[in-house]
Amino acid sequence: MMELLTSAEAWAALLTLTALEIVLGIDNVIFLSVIVSRIPAAQAKRARQIGLLLALVFRIILLSLLVWLIGLTEPVLTVKSVALSWRDIILIGGGLFLIAKATHEIHAEVEARDVEPDATPKASAFFWVIVQIIIIDMVFSLDSIITAIGMAQDLEIMIAAVVIACVIMYVSSGPVARFVADHPTTKMLALAFLVLIGVALVADGFKFHIPRGYIYFAIAFSAAVEMFNVLAKRNRKRAAS
């Protein structure tokens, strides 16, 4: 352990892996922000906390099962000359779930005019929110940890990077969720991001890798444009008042 603390290579690996885990955690934060927006505020905070705690637990459990996890990359099924492993099947299932969930939420937002004005989120939805968070946490954790295994050799470094990334995700999830809830247009944008991420997961499952840099650049560019729209709207309100 002391050798890792005094090793410049270990610190470099920790910083690199932590940055990567934070970037990969963006998907989790976006999903959490959208999914908790339909339940009461008090329960939304609890759901975020439970979701991020589960994300941390899943990642640490997967790291402790390295031999089993590596076995998930072995082909178990062939579809039209494409060999699929359990990891691929999980990514395809998770991607389809994300696409279906985001499409359902987009439909609900677009058709919101058909809902009575006094309609409020039901507290009973909390259980189903947690179930959906568990499903997507498992998918994102699997993708995240397999990436970590490819970048670092020491289990201590992987666990430290995952813990740091989850702490940062926890700190940022609250402000992101509030911003999404306060600005309906950003929620629609977040849902579009989820569709994009879902397509990327399905493509990865079928061995067609879409470089994540392209996806994150598209997300960053769209978010920057939306931020300018929000600022412009705020300035118009100030000028009108």
Image (tube, rainbow, N blue to C red):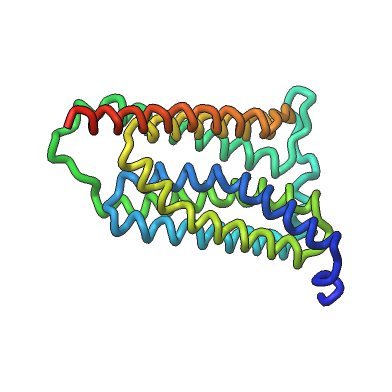
In percent of width and height, residue 209 lies at: 72, 30
* Relative horizontal placement of residue 137, taking residue 180 as reference (left or right): right
For the C terminus, the quadrant is: top left
Examine the rendered structure and indicate whether residue 131 appears above or below residue 167: above
- Where is residue 56 drawn, in percent x and y? 58, 61
The residue drawn where x is 54% and y is 51% is 137
Q: Nearer the viewer, residue 16 or 145?
A: 16
Name the residue rendered at 83%, 77% in the picture: 2
Q: Nearer the viewer, residue 24 or 7?
A: 7
Front residue of 27/60: it is 27
In the rendered image, which quarter is residue 11 located in?
A: bottom right
Q: Quadrant of residue 230?
A: top left
Question: Residue at the spot x=23%, y=29% of the render?
Answer: 239
Q: Residue 100: where, in percent of width, then height?
A: 46, 32
Q: Is residue 146 left or right of residue 113?
A: right
Q: Position of residue 53 (x, y in %)?
A: 51, 62
Identify which residue is drawn at 47% across, 29% down: 192
